[in-house]
Amino acid sequence: MDTFERLELAFARLLLLVMAGIVLGCAGTHYPHPAYPSTAASISSDVPADSDLRAIRDQYARLSRAFEAMQVDSILAIRSPEFSATPPGAPKQDAAQMRQVLDQFFITNKPPIKTWMTIRSAERLGADTIRVVVLQQASRYQDLAGKRRHVEHDVTQNETWRREGGVWKLYYVDSVRDRHRWVDGKPIDPSKPFDPKAPPYEGPAP
């Protein structure tokens, strides 16, 4: 093999390595590991924030602290007495049913529990009603497949806030979408039971 042939072979190998790197990089581009904001509650920079939206952001910050402290009463205090939610693929649930969901959350999930809420957009529906699109992110621990594991998720949803007695209360949650989940840093299919042997889930193409 002469010098030219050796150089040509080396170039071919280098090209294969580069292409392999591109393929591996693309495999995770539509399901990357979450990046968390510096604060628990924030408003996207492109969203005009008036005093009402900043007050709602402050309520999200209180919610985050209440989840971290596992204080159910503090969470309920931020919800309207008429709070309700429509989970994905399920009928609308009232305040009592959502209280049961909250209680189960703290049975299933173990501390430390961290949450982040980022307001992506806002629409005023009335003088005392604002609907926001929120990116919700969370980190906590669960006992899965015989081991305590680090579980993370993010989800986008609509949340309607209503001013009651001069205080903004969470009134309604719907349009829950774009769910992602990680267990011990590995992306998994959020629609299926956890399988520690499953390959990393790439998620649907964008």
Image (tube, helix red, strand yellow):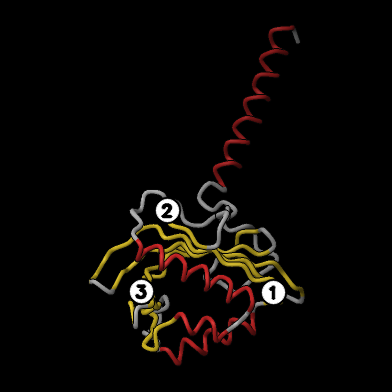
Position of 12 compared to 94: left or right?
A: right
Query: Label 1 near label 3: C-beta < 8 Å?
Result: no
Q: Earlier in the sequence, mark 3 or mark 1?
A: 1
Cα separation, mark 3 vs mark 2, equals 18 Å
- Mark 3 Cα-neighbour bin, 10 Å: few <14, some 14–19, many ≥20: many
Please state the horizontal and vertical placement of residue 139, each as a whole percent of the image.
Answer: 62, 66
- Mark 1 Cα-neighbour bin, 10 Å: few <14, some 14–19, many ≥20: some
Secondary structure beneath dot 1 equals strand
Q: Amino acid at mark 1?
A: Pro
Query: Residue 197, relative to residue 111: is it above or below?
Result: above
Q: Say which mark, if any, is on residue 161.
A: 3
Please state the horizontal and vertical placement of residue 93, each as a whole percent of the image.
Answer: 40, 87
Write down the quadrant of residue 70 in the picture.
Answer: bottom right
Q: Say which mark, if any, is on residue 38.
A: none
Please state the horizontal and vertical placement of residue 112, each as a whole percent of the image.
Answer: 69, 71
Write down the quadrant of residue 195 in the picture.
Answer: bottom right
**Residue at the location (35% across, 78% down)?**
166
Report the residue marked by disc 1: 111
Secondary structure beneath dot 2 equals loop
Q: Earlier in the sequence, mark 2 or mark 1?
A: 2
Query: Residue 143, relative to residue 16: is it above or below?
Result: below
Nearer to the camera, 67 or 135: 67
Report the residue marked by disc 2: 44
Position of 175 compared to 39: left or right?
A: left
**Residue at the location (76% across, 73% down)?**
147
